[in-house]
Image (cartoon, grey):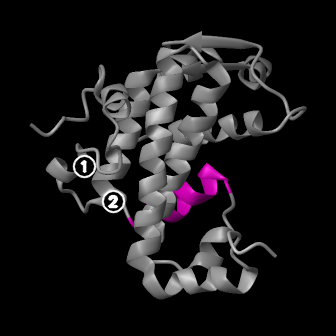
Amino acid sequence: MSDSVPSKSSLGELDTDKPFTAFWFFHHSEQFYALARFSYFGFLIDATFVNAHHTVEYLLKSILMKRLDTQTLKKFGHNLKKLWQEYRKLDQNNPTPDDYIDYLNRYDILRYPNLGGFRRVAWGWSIKEFLEIAKNDAMKAHSGCFNLDDFDEIVYNLRLSYFDGNKEQATQAYMLVNETAKEVLYRKNAFMNEKK
């Protein structure tokens, strides 16, 4: 086995330093967040959806890792709905509607070929508008929407939870040192503030 790939037994070692592992997930969530926003501005539809899913998944895992071990966390896989249900046991105050996370969980199908995909995309529609209009299950199954303001708010609320309610910490970029990445993160983002 290559030295760069951790063995199965070494994965358990991550549990010995929960703060590091939680931060590792947070660090990656910030990168996926910048990628999702970059993809959005470039109208890269599938990349936007997949990176949005990754962002929320890794943020949820960063929060849950503070209280769970790696093996328990792995049981949730990439399922945002299951991760969200576990997260809700810890934080009932997050204003993000549960059905928004359930909707974002659909983006995971874009990760693999032949699992389906969206035939129609309502770019800019809010999740609330889309869920109200797409009451027809067939339409929901083959359509999608992406609204940057909705996504930014979901991310902000999770970052706020990660930082235990500290709004100043929740609005700062920590892992992005590249000016281009920072610009993408802050552009038209009502929830992030560049530290002067």
Instruction: Name the residue type under label 2.
Output: Tyr
Residue 76 in sight in this render: yes
Q: CA distance from mark 2 to mark 1?
A: 8 Å
Q: CB under 8 Å between callouts 2 and 1?
A: yes
Q: Residues within 10 Å of mark 2 (few under 14, many from 20)?
A: many
Task: State yes or no: residue 85 in magenta.
Answer: yes
Hey, which residue is sitting farthest right in the picture? 114
Q: Is residue 19 above or below residue 140?
A: below
Name the image quarter holding the C terminus: top left
Up/down of 42 relative to 115, above or below: above
- What's drawn in magenta, residue-wise? 78-90
Quadrant for the N terminus in the image = bottom right
Vertical comparison of 85 with 190: above or below:
below
Labels 2 and 1: the sequence-earlier one: 2
Residue type (three-letter) at the residue carrying disc 1: Ala
Q: Point out residue 98 in the picture as x, y percentages from the top left corner.
A: 50, 44
Callout 2 secondary element: helix
**Residue count near mark 1 (Cα–Cα under 10 Å), binned few <14, some 14–19, many ≥20:** many
Q: Residue farthest to the left? A: 196
Does residue 131 show up magenta in the picture?
Answer: no
Residue drawn at (59%, 11%) of the image: 122
Residue drawn at the location 24% of the way across and 27% of the way down: 190
**Residue 51 percent coordinates (x, y):** 57, 37
Give the farthest residue toward the front: 3
- SS state under label 1: helix
Residue 66 in view here: no
Instruction: Give the residue number, with chain letter if any, for mark 2.
Output: 162
Q: Which mark is residue 170?
A: 1
Residue at 57% over, 86% down: 13
In the drawing, what numbered circle is on residue 128? none
Q: Is 25 placed above or below 178 here? A: below
